[in-house]
Amino acid sequence: MVKKKLAFDDIAYTRPSDILFLILTRVPVKSLLRFKSVCKAWNVMISDDEFRRTHRDQCKVLGREKLLLHKCYSNFYTNEFEFRDLETSQLVTIAKQVFPPEKFRKAIILCSCDGLLLLKNPGAYKVYVLWNPSTKEYQTLACPYFNLMTNAKFQVVVGCVMILVSMITSLYLSTSGIIENNGCWTEKAT
Amino acid sequence: MVKLKSNDDKEFEVEEAAVIQSEMIKNMIEDGCATSVIPLPNIDSKTLIKVIEYLNKHINMGKAAETGEEDDLKEFDEQFVNMGWEELFDVIMAANYLNIHELMELCCQSAADRLKNKSVRAVREMLKITNDLTEEEEQEIINDAPWAFEGPEIDDTVN
């Protein structure tokens, strides 16, 4: 009888850090970046991949992904982007953000996935940039396989974009995990 | 009626329709393990009273939707989460253990909403956390995203 009760207790045991995990996955990104400096344990938890993944899933459950993004038309030749909330009203701009690097000044959005954006300059077919507007992190990526045959160029680019999108999906909200390695994009070993 | 026993040996009678909102107890009843008193070794009576209050109020959730009492329920939920941090943590732990999804959702979201605009100093004080980062480590985190530490919404008060 005593033995059975112990086993029962063991399964049900929840540590306070598990509860904290559940609470913090419901906190917005800006707050989380600030809360990393609360203490060591919080920094480790918030920086962890498992946490990022849960946070992304939680955001999807809460429907926070319903944002419309577009380049500001009033000022086309700057890299200013608008985020509009589709839930409340299409006319309410909730945030304006400027994409930082000067050389991506005329960049266009190729695709997006789970809050990450893939941008490139209309003139450049070899250099892409992966941007996470929530954390304001970005990473430039060089297309590793590049075919000089003009009519094949477009297909190569499309192929690269598709590979990248599938990798973003597996890497969650982190732009830091992709590296160029021996001529192809791979996930950084942790 | 189902009898629940807290870890300080107090017994509570709850209607079966209310208590089966707990997946854990629902499974116990279905398996025929709930014939006598169900001991809850990690829930104290103070927390259990809160949880039972929630279960009783939410028992007719389906009915409430039909009769337009949703606002009433919403108001109850708002009042319900109006408690201290330690109490809220205890209820979350209990809801997690008993596997009451809606209650878990309500309390975690409430905790997250209370924290989200707080300054780092306020969070440490509210949750009684000692900062064990070195000055360099702390500065590095700030330098990574200085914009996250600025803004009109950031609230330094503790409540």
Image (spheres, rainbow, N blue to C red):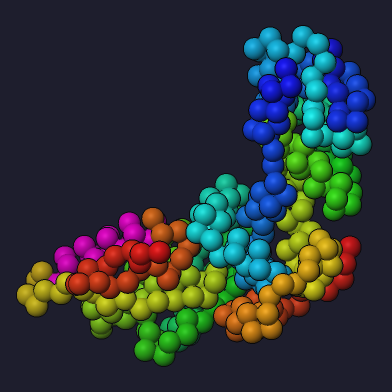
Q: Position of residue A57 (x, y in %)?
A: 53, 50
The answer to whether residue B147 of the structure is visible from this angle is no
Q: Is residue A161 magenta?
A: yes
Foreground of the two, B132 or B91: B132
Q: Tell me which corner region of the image, top left, top right, bottom left or bottom right, holds residue B56.
A: top right
Boundaries of the magenta span:
A153-169
Where does the image place residue B66, in percent across and percent down from the top left? 75, 25
Position of B73 relative to B13 (above/below): below
Residue A131: x %, y % from top left: 44, 73
Across and down, in percent, residue A70 comes to 47, 71
Q: Quadrant of the C terminus of chain A?
A: bottom left
The quarter of the picture where residue B62 lies is top right
Residue that appears at 23% across and 78% down? A125
Q: Is residue B96 left or right of residue A172?
A: right
Residue plotted at (81% across, 11% down): B36
Residue B5 appears anywhere in the view: yes
Q: Residue furthest left?
A: A149
- Whether B119 is drawn above or below B45: the answer is below
Quadrant of the frame with the N terminus of chain A: top right
Residue at x-position 58% and y-position 50%:
A58
- In the picture, measured across the screen, residue B76 lies left or right of residue B146, that is right
Look at the picture and state if B107 lies above or below B129: above
Tell me, yes or no, whether the highlighted magenta stretch contains residue A140. Answer: no
On screen, residue B144 versus residue A170, left or right, reads: right
Residue found at the far bottom of this picture: A102
